[in-house]
Image (tube, rainbow, N blue to C red):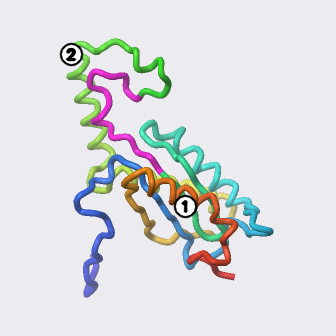
């Protein structure tokens, strides 16, 4: 229980439930320490924990059937990624669970009983994933935990900044601008707002 501390205002948009959409996510290390490696000649040279962090980012898409990492970069003291989260309630009713290839769209339409069962399963899954946190927070929380656990198992000192920053991507033009920023981040490290020597 907190005593004599003001309630922190949530940085989340009140009009959005964070259970679907495209997000620009930034996660920093504690005190912006350079845990993930160094930039030499505009290229990121990953440390051991930096390599593992990159592997965990790639695994986000493998471990979460409703999420795809479309772009990412690991920098010395932070990571950026574009995370696309599919709303579970948008799929399933009269469709295959989540189409991944063109042939998946040709699956048979489920019967009324199957639709009812799918609806119950989807609702149960949504409740399990905690709507109060939002799907994005659950995914990022799991990712951060995996990296922290790896560091502890290796006997490394490592810590994340407590929170992470996310921005809802609203259109294709914004997506392109953010994706370009992510790709060019190592080239512009000295100009970066997270730059610390």
> As displayed, is residue 22 above or below residue 99?
below
Instruction: Tell me the quadrant of the picture where the N terminus can be found.
Output: bottom left
Q: Residue at x 53, y 45 (%)?
A: 60
Q: Name the foreground residue: 82 vs 63.
A: 82
Instruction: Tell me the quadrant of the picture where the C terminus can be found.
Output: bottom right
Determine if residue 75 is in view.
yes
Secondary structure beneath label 1: strand
Q: Residue furthest right?
A: 41
Q: Residue at x 33, y 69 (%)?
A: 11
> As displayed, is residue 188 above or below residue 179?
below
Q: Residue furthest front?
A: 173
Badge number at residue 152: none
Q: Name the foreground residue: 83 vs 42.
A: 42
Secondary structure beneath label 2: helix
Q: Residue at x 69, y 67 (%)?
A: 187
Q: Residue at x 36, y 54 (%)?
A: 170
> As displayed, is residue 107 above or below residue 119?
above
Magenta highlight range: 83-98
Q: Residue furthest bottom?
A: 4
Place of residue 9 in the rendered image (x, y in percent of width and height, measured from the top left): 28, 75
Place of residue 118 in the rendered image (x, y in percent of width and height, measured from the top left): 27, 25
Residue designated by label 1? 80
Place of residue 41 in the rendered image (x, y in percent of width and height, measured from the top left): 80, 68
Write down the quadrant of residue 37 in the picture.
bottom right
């Amino acid at each position: 229980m907190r005593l004599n501390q003001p309630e922190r205002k949530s940085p989340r948009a009140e009009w959005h439930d964070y259970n679907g959409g495209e997000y620009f996510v930034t996660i920093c290390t504690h005190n912006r320490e350079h845990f993930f490696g160094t930039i030499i000649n505009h290229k990121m040279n990953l440390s051991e924990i930096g390599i593992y962090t990159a592997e965990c980012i790639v695994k986000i898409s493998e471990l979460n059937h409703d999420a795809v990492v479309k772009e990412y970069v690991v920098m010395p003291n932070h990571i950026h990624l574009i995370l696309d989260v599919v709303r579970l309630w948008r799929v399933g009713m009269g469709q295959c669970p989540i189409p991944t290839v063109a042939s998946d769209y040709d699956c048979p339409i489920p019967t009324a009983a199957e639709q009812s069962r799918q609806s119950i399963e989807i609702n149960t899954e949504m409740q399990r994933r905690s709507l109060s946190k939002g799907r994005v927070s659950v995914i990022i929380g799991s990712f951060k935990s995996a990296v922290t656990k790896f560091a502890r198992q290796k006997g490394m000192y490592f810590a994340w900044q407590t929170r992470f920053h996310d921005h809802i991507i609203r259109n294709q033009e914004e997506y392109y601008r953010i994706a370009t920023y992510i790709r060019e981040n190592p080239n512009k490290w000295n100009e970066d707002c997270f730059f610390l020597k």
